[in-house]
Image: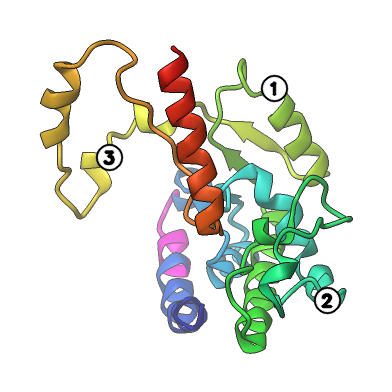
Amino acid sequence: MEHIFAVNSSCEAPFWERLAALLEAPGARDQVACLVADAHLLALVRVARRLGVPTLVPPHRQRRLLPQLRGYPVLCHKGYLPVRAESQLDAPVRELPPYRIRDLMGANSNSRHEHELMCKLLSRAVEAMRSSAGFVFNPFDALEADDLAATRRDLAGVPVFAVRPLHKLSPASSSSLLQQDRSCLDWLDAQAPAFVLYITFGSLASMSGADLDSCYAALWCRQVCT
C-alpha cells in the first residue's frame, strides 16, 4: 500500500506536465476524449479533472467488493477489524449480510497500522470512482443485469458502462509481461468432457484447513455419487 501512495506522489507532477503539454497542441482537446485510470491512481484522476479531461475508472477488483470499499472505515470503527482472535472469523457482519468477518478485506491481518493504511487507500479509491465521469465495468450485460443494477445503485450519479468481456478484445499475451504457460492445454484437450473441475476462491479468501477439507470432501462425494 505504501508503494501505491509513493507512485501517486511521484507521478503527479510529471503527469500534469505531460498532459498539459499534450492538451496545448492544436486540436488536442478534440482528440483526447478521456483518461482511463485505475482507482488507486487518484493523483492522476485529480490532475485530469483540474485540466478539464473526463476520467473513466475501471472496476476496483470485483463489483461485489464495492460495499466493502465504502464501508471499510466504518467496519474498522465498529471493531470488526483488525481481528483479535481466530474465533471471530466466522462471526457475521451485520451491516453486510451474508459476509462473515473472514470474508472482509484484511481479515488475515491483525496490524492496526495496516488497517489504517487500507482505510486511506480505499477512501481514495472511492473518491476516484465517485469523481469520475464514468465507471467502466467488465460484465456481459445480458447475463449480469442484476449486478449492473446493483452497481448503478452503489454508484448513484456515476454512469456505469458495461464494456463486455475485455479479454475477448485484448488477449492476455498482448498486455502481459510474462509468457503464458500453455503446457496444460494439450493434456486438458485429451481428457473426456467434464473431467476437470476448476475452482477459484480468489486472492483475498481467508479459509481454514477445516474449510478446505470440507470442500475436498464434498467434491470427492460428488465424484463418487456420479
Calculate the distance from the C-alpha at mark 3 to the C-alpha at mark 2: 40 Å
Image quadrant in which the C terminus is located: top left
Kindly indicate the quadrant of the structure image that contains residue 75: bottom right
* Residue receiving disc 2: 79
Residue 209 in view in this figure: yes
The answer to whether the residue labelled 3 contacts the one labelled 1, judged by CB atoms less than 8 Å apart, is no
Q: Secondary structure at mark 3?
A: helix
Q: Secondary structure at mark 1?
A: helix
The residue shown at (74%, 74%) is: 81
Indicate which label's residue lies in the foreground, 3 or 2.
Answer: 2
* Residue receiving disc 1: 145
Q: Amino acid at mark 1?
A: Ala
Relative to the observer, which residue lies in front, 205 or 154? 205
Left or right for 37, reference 77: left
Kindly indicate the quadrant of the structure image that contains residue 10: bottom left
Rendering coords of residue 69 (x, y %): 71, 60
Q: Which residues are magenta?
A: 20-27
Q: Is residue 217 above or below residue 189?
A: below
Q: Is residue 87 above or below residue 157?
A: below
Mostly what secondary structure, the magenta segment?
Answer: helix
Rendering coords of residue 207 (x, y %): 55, 56
Q: Which mark is residue 172?
A: 3
Q: Nearer the N terminus, badge 2 or badge 1?
A: 2
Q: Is residue 8 above or below residue 205?
A: below
